[in-house]
Image: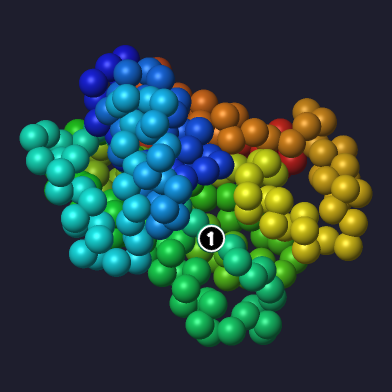
């Protein structure tokens, strides 16, 4: 199903991005993982058809350079826009303009830039954007992050209308997934252990998500099993948004 298909995953150095890149590679796809963290270079050490490149997705020249070799001989079949940051969550009034602009640049504009560059080489295929449940429900002291992720949802729906039927575009909204970003959130809490227990206990499925849970959802949306699905938002959160 994915044998020899070409897949690009951004934010692939860890968490959801790394699990997603490995899921496609396991299925036989040729995968390029992009991330600004140098650790991305080693992600393919144990997976021959997975290559990691260090790339600042806010830099147009670096994006072009990273894609040139991978797309030289053929187009791309799947693009997963996963890269995102939330370094200092705060309310709107407490968000410095520099942080607001940084979140927009990394979470939204980078998606625009990478997608535009890749689509020049995509006659048909699938694009999956990673948003967040905060795009749909909001959260205290997360104004800028929620705004960028809400924009990703709207962008997904607009792209699905613009680029069908050749290209399907869908969105995945993860909930509380055990990633580096989630651990950073816990560290900001007065009692990280209690907060982890509270979140887990509030979910109908009574467990936190794993990066592999999101990777499986992304893989499904990219597969032929989802061939009549486009412009949709799939919430994967253990039932929290139910």
The crowding category of the residue bearing disc 1, from other C-alpha atoms within 10 Å (few below 14, some 14 to 19, many at least 20), is some
Residue at (83% x, 46% y) in the render: 196
- Residue 234: x, y in percent? 54, 37
Quadrant location of residue 200?
A: top right
- Residue 51: x, y in percent? 31, 36
Residue at (43% x, 64% y) in the render: 106
- The answer to whether residue 157 is above or below residue 210 is below
Is 25 on the left or on the right of 107, as rendered? left
Of residues 220 and 213, the one drawn nearer to the viewer in this rendering? 213
Quadrant location of residue 47?
A: top left
Q: Is residue 221 visible?
A: no
Q: How many circles with numbers are drawn on the protein? A: 1
- Residue 162: x, y in percent? 25, 48
Of residues 242 and 129, the one drawn nearer to the viewer in this rendering? 129
Is 76 on the left or on the right of 136, as rendered? left
Residue at (52% x, 76% y) in the render: 100
- The answer to whether residue 234 is above or below residue 99 is above
Residue at (24% x, 44% y) in the render: 163
Question: Which residue corresponds to mark 1?
Answer: 85
Q: Check the picture and name the quadrant holding the N terminus.
A: top left
Residue at the left extreme, as displayed = 73
Q: How is the image coloured?
A: rainbow
Quadrant location of residue 197?
A: top right
- The answer to whether residue 39 is above or below residue 142 is above
């Amino acid at each position: 199903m994915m044998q020899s298909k070409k897949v690009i995953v951004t934010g692939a150095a860890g968490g959801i991005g790394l699990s997603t890149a490995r899921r496609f590679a396991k299925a036989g796809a040729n995968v390029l993982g992009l991330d600004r963290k140098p650790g991305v270079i080693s992600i393919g050490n144990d997976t021959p058809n997975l290559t990691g490149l260090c790339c600042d997705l806010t830099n147009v020249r670096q994006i072009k350079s990273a894609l040139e070799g991978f797309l030289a001989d053929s187009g791309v079949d799947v693009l997963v826009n996963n890269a995102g940051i939330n370094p200092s969550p705060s309310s709107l009034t407490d968000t410095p303009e520099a942080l607001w602009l940084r979140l927009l640049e990394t979470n939204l504009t980078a998606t625009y830039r990478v997608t535009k560059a890749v689509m020049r080489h995509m006659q048909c295929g699938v694009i999956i954007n990673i948003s967040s449940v905060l795009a749909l429900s909001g959260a205290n002291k997360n104004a800028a992050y929620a705004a960028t992720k809400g924009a990703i949802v709207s962008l997904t729906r607009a792209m699905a209308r613009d680029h069908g039927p050749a290209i399907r575009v869908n969105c995945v909204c993860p909930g509380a997934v055990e990633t580096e970003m989630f651990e950073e959130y816990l560290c900001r809490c007065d009692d990280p252990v209690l907060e982890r227990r509270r979140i887990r206990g509030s979910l109908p499925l009574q467990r936190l998500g794993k990066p592999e849970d999101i990777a499986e959802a992304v893989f499904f949306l990219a597969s032929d099993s989802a061939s009549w699905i486009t412009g949709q938002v799939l919430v994967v959160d253990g039932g929290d948004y139910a």
